[in-house]
Image: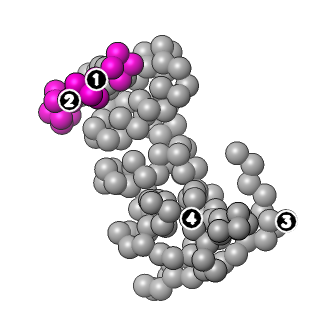
Amino acid sequence: MSNILLFRPKRHKDSRRQQIISLVPKDKSEGYKADIAEKTLEAKDYIYYLAYIISYNAYNYVSKQHKERIRELTNIGVLDEVAYTSKSGLTDSCVQYNNFVYKGKSYELPGNYVARIRFLIDYDIYVEAFNKLGDCRLYKFIYEDGTHKWEQIDENDYLVDF
């Protein structure tokens, strides 16, 4: 685990954050801490905890159950940016600063739509996007042979319920 845990400026110190960080395993022998975190932390803090697991490269130290939760949250777009920017290998795409990013390259959506969330279903990448008027569209990102295209998904064809 990175030594960055040892340096936290005073403005970033609070008891909740310290509790969460103290539960991040430093090696395989501390993997049990994820079970403690799941039982003791509130749901919101547990999601923060899973993000710290990714950020501090402790993913391989937790049990299969916690790895699956991290994968699920990454696939539905909750932890995708953390997983992508930390180069964890969990995903090769995310929505970052209202842009869709795939393998290090930013892709614009058609019709002045701005990406809001990216999620995976059966290895297909979908992006929910909005325009300035607040209209929402769902696009499927297709990347083949070095080129990409966006396929607009009709809301009646594919309903996604979170």
Q: Which residue does the image show at 14% across and 33% down from the upper left?
A: 3
Q: Secondary structure at mark 4?
A: strand
Query: How far from the left and from the top, in percent, is residue 101?
Result: 44, 67
**Residue 121 higher or lower than 161, as above or below:** below
Q: Amino acid at mark 3?
A: Asn
Q: Which residue is mark 3?
A: 156
Instruction: Name the residue at 75% across, 49% down.
Output: 161
Depth check, front residue: 122 or 36: 36
Q: Which residues are magenta?
A: 1-17
- The percent position of residue 37, horizontal first and vertical second, equals 43, 19
Mark on residue 115? 4
Q: Which is more foreground, mark 2 or mark 3? A: 2
Dot 3 crowding, Cα within 10 Å, few <14, some 14–19, many 20+: few
For label 1, the residue is 13
Q: Amino acid at mark 2?
A: Pro
Secondary structure state at the residue bearing disc 1:
loop
Q: Residues within 10 Å of mark 4 (few under 14, many from 20)?
A: many
